[in-house]
Image (cartoon, rainbow, N blue to C red):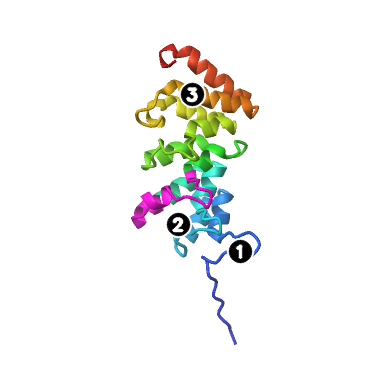
Amino acid sequence: LRKSLTINMSELDWDTDFTPLHYAAARGNDQAVKALLKYVEVGVENKEKCTPLHFAAYAGYAIVARTLIDECKKQGNAKEILNAKDDQGSSPIFYAAGGPRDHGNTQVVASLLVESGVDPRQTLDNSTLLEIAASLGNVEVVKYCLTKIEEIVPQDSDVSPIIQSAAKLAKQEGQYDTLVMLQDYLNDHPNSI
């Protein structure tokens, strides 16, 4: 007798609170992500309310992020998922700002999110994307923010105080690469001071 096996692809792993789609996104496995999207909603959340896009953004897996973003658009819920907040209020773009830089490209993920409609002016605990990236030492996302500074700074805000705040946060956190980059920007753009 053959028994059939039913696997719930949306069920969270008891130890890690990940679905298979979370695992695939966190590891940058685009083929697995594509296969799993046939069985799992793109916006499936773990117990901390993180979607697979949070994990792809954090790890800087741009190809996986693109696959997930495209699937959001196909399902018609892109705005909701691209801006989904975890239980700490952090959306995928802030995960990109805070991700490790050793195996992915968080700058590309941040730009993909913005190109897909994520508002780069959103804040997390009153901190901008630039300030968070600077305090966490994410040189690539800081570089991206500086090239898009007018789009990143909240409307009706002066650019200089935000860049100075980002520099101060970088200094406090010992993120000297981002500190130097911000100071160079201020020196090269004296009109923003």
Say which label, 2 or 3, has the lower sequence index.
2
Mark 2 crowd level (few <14, some 14–19, many ≥20, 10 Å Cα): many
In the rendered structure, which segment of residues is drawn in magenta?
70-92
Q: Do we see residue 175 in this rendering?
A: no
Q: Quadrant of residue 156?
A: top left
70 in relation to 152, above or below: below
**Which of marks 1 and 3 precedes in the sequence?**
1
Q: What is the secondary structure assignment of the residue under circle 3?
A: helix
Residue 86 at x, y percent in the picture: 51, 51
Sequence-wise, the earlier of marks 2 and 1 is: 1
> Is the Cβ of the residue at disc 2 closer than 8 Å to that at disc 1?
no
Name the quadrant of the N terminus: bottom right
Q: Badge 1 is on which residue?
A: 13
Q: Is residue 4 above or below residue 164?
A: below
Residue 27 in the magenta stretch? The answer is: no
Of the pair 63 and 89, the residue shown nearer to us: 89
Q: What residue does disc 3 label? A: 163
**Residue labelled with disc 2:** 43
Going 41% across and 26% down the picture, which residue do you hit? 149
Asked if residue 76 lies in the magenta stretch, the reply is yes
SS type, badge 2: loop
User: What amino acid is found at the position of numbered circle 3 in the picture?
Assistant: Ile
Tag in front: 3 or 1: 3
Q: What is the distance, in whole Å, between disc 2 and disc 3 at their CAs?
A: 33 Å
Question: Can residue 140 be seen in this snapshot?
Answer: yes
> Is the residue 187 above or below the residue 105 in the image?
above
Residues under labels 2 and 1: Cα distance?
A: 16 Å
Q: Nearer the viewer, mark 2 or mark 3?
A: 3
